[in-house]
């Protein structure tokens, strides 16, 4: 392959996928790209963005009384997808089963770069609980439907049921609102542009 692994961001910034440059990681690009990425590979009742998902995960963490640093990480936990795209879990499992860890390695590189860019600590394990709760809320309100939560997760969904049952129904935001709300959340959480 002669072409280096670059992507062009919405702002026009060129992104090196293997060697992130911190000054090229822009919150406005992250917000714009995530607002246009659909969760569940589009298998939902209505378009539901990764940006709105990030806002939901951060809200769940905040309502649970998590430390501000955990809530900050929750807000940007899927930020690497602005350059790597939202690869569905079944595809990730297939890649791992065949020994292909490329996506996982790239995600780790970008998690580290985003944490460094915004001065954050990574809280993957703590945020994963809220990420899974958000997934179940999203399924409840917007699909995909057809199988139980236990089947969908491949494990018992009981640990997340209290968080799911206590939340109001979500209504998918249009992309411009998702972008705007993501940026507002990041400003409130003091994630500097």
Image: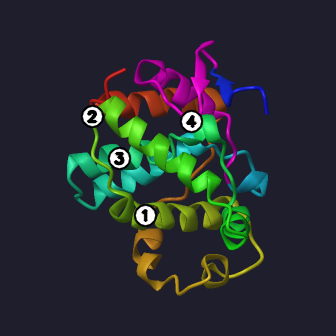
Magenta range: 10-39
> Spatial distance from mark 3 to mark 4, Cα to Cα?
22 Å
User: Which sits earlier in the primary sequence, circle 4 or circle 2?
Assistant: 4
Along the viewing direction, whichever of 80 and 19 lies nearer the viewer: 19
Direction from residue 91 to residue 189 in the image, left or right = left
Q: Quadrant of the C terminus?
A: top left
Please say whether residue 31 is one of the residues in the magenta stretch.
Answer: yes
The residue that mark 2 highlights is: 119
Residue drawn at x 67%, y 40% as measured from the top left: 37
Residue 53 visible in the snapshot: no
Above or below residue 190? Residue 165 is below
Q: CA distance from mark 1 to mark 3?
A: 11 Å
Counting every numbered tag in the picture gives: 4
Q: Which residue is mark 4?
A: 18
Q: Is the image coloured rainbow, by chain, by secondary structure, or in one colour?
A: rainbow
Q: Give the label, 1 or 4, closer to the camera.
A: 4
Q: Which of these two is toward me, 98 or 83?
A: 98
Closer to us: mark 4 or mark 2? 4
């Amino acid at each position: 392959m002669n072409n280096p692994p670059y992507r062009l961001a919405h702002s026009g910034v060129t992104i090196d996928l293997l060697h992130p440059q911190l000054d090229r990681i822009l919150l406005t690009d992250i917000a714009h790209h995530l607002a246009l990425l659909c969760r569940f590979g589009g298998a939902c009742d209505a378009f539901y963005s990764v940006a709105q998902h990030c806002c939901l995960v951060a809200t769940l963490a905040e309502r649970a009384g998590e430390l501000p640093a955990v809530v900050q990480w929750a807000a940007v936990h899927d930020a690497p997808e602005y350059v790597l795209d939202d690869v569905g879990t079944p595809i990730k499992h297939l890649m791992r089963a065949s020994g292909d860890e490329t996506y996982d390695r790239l995600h780790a590189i970008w998690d580290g770069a985003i944490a460094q860019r915004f001065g954050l600590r990574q809280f993957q394990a703590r945020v994963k609980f809220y990420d899974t709760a958000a997934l179940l809320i999203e399924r409840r309100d917007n699909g995909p439907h057809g199988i139980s939560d236990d089947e969908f997760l491949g494990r018992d969904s009981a640990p997340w049921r209290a968080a799911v049952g206590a939340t109001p129904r979500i209504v998918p935001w249009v992309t411009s609102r998702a972008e705007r709300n993501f940026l507002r959340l990041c400003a409130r959480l003091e994630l500097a542009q």
